[in-house]
């Protein structure tokens, strides 16, 4: 485990401990805040675990992976534009009825997953 991974893990454990302390403080802190702090802590802990399994000296970035990442993110943005346009027209003509909070969460997760699938697609194609 390298130094950065150790720092991430220590910060994650600290955030989890903070959220547990807030649970025992009672109603003085909102449940949403407690949940958010715990979720961030567990997400950071998961990242530290994933990083700890990397082999020493393993290259994580090179020209090919940077090109694939750039291309997949560009495709993700364009696909998200199309998704937002489709949501607009579907709500405009009453095909679906969603509020702003739902719309933002749909757009966010669509963007994340479209970037992930585009990256998998372009990485599998060989030369991007």
Image: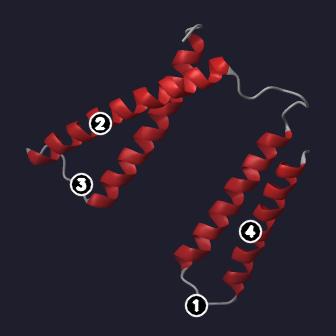
Alpha carbon of mark 4 to alpha carbon of mark 2: how far? 36 Å
Say whether residue 40 is left or right of residue 74. right
Say whether residue 63 is left or right of residue 45. left
Say whether residue 63 is left or right of residue 94. right
Tell me, yes or no, whether the two marked residues, 4 and 1, touch with CB atoms within 8 Å: no
Residue density around tag 3, few if under 14, some if 14–19, many if 20 or more, within 10 Å: few
Residue density around tag 1, few if under 14, some if 14–19, many if 20 or more, within 10 Å: few
Vertical comparison of 123 with 20: above or below: above
Q: Secondary structure at mark 3?
A: loop
Location of the C terminus by quadrant is top right
**Residue 27 numbered mark, or none:** 1
Residue that badge 3 annotates: 98
- Looking at the image, which residue is at 41% across and 39% down? 110
Alpha carbon of mark 2 to alpha carbon of mark 1: how far? 42 Å
Residue that badge 4 annotates: 16
Which circle's residue, 4 or 3, is located before the other in the chain? 4
- Looking at the image, which residue is at 75% across and 29% down? 60
Vertical comparison of 107 with 123: above or below: below
Quarter location, residue 81: top left
Q: Secondary structure at mark 2?
A: helix
Front residue of 58 and 100: 58
Which circle's residue, 1 or 3, is located before the other in the chain? 1
Which circle's residue, 3 or 2, is located before the other in the chain? 2
- Looking at the image, which residue is at 89% across and 50% down? 3
Mark 3 vs mark 2: in front? 2
Location of the N terminus by quadrant is top right
Residue that badge 2 annotates: 81
Quarter location, residue 125: top right
């Amino acid at each position: 485990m390298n130094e950065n991974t150790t720092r991430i893990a220590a910060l994650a454990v600290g955030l989890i401990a903070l959220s547990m302390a807030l649970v025992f403080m009672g109603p003085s802190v909102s449940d949403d805040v407690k949940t958010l702090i715990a979720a961030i802590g567990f997400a950071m802990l998961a990242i530290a675990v994933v990083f700890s399994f990397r082999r020493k000296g393993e290259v994580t970035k090179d020209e090919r992976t940077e090109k694939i990442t750039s291309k997949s993110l560009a495709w993700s943005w364009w696909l998200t534009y199309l998704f937002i346009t489709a949501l607009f027209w579907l709500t405009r003509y009453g095909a679906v009825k969603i509020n702003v909070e739902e719309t933002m969460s749909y757009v966010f997760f669509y963007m994340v997953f479209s970037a992930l699938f585009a990256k998998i697609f372009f990485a599998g194609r060989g030369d991007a």
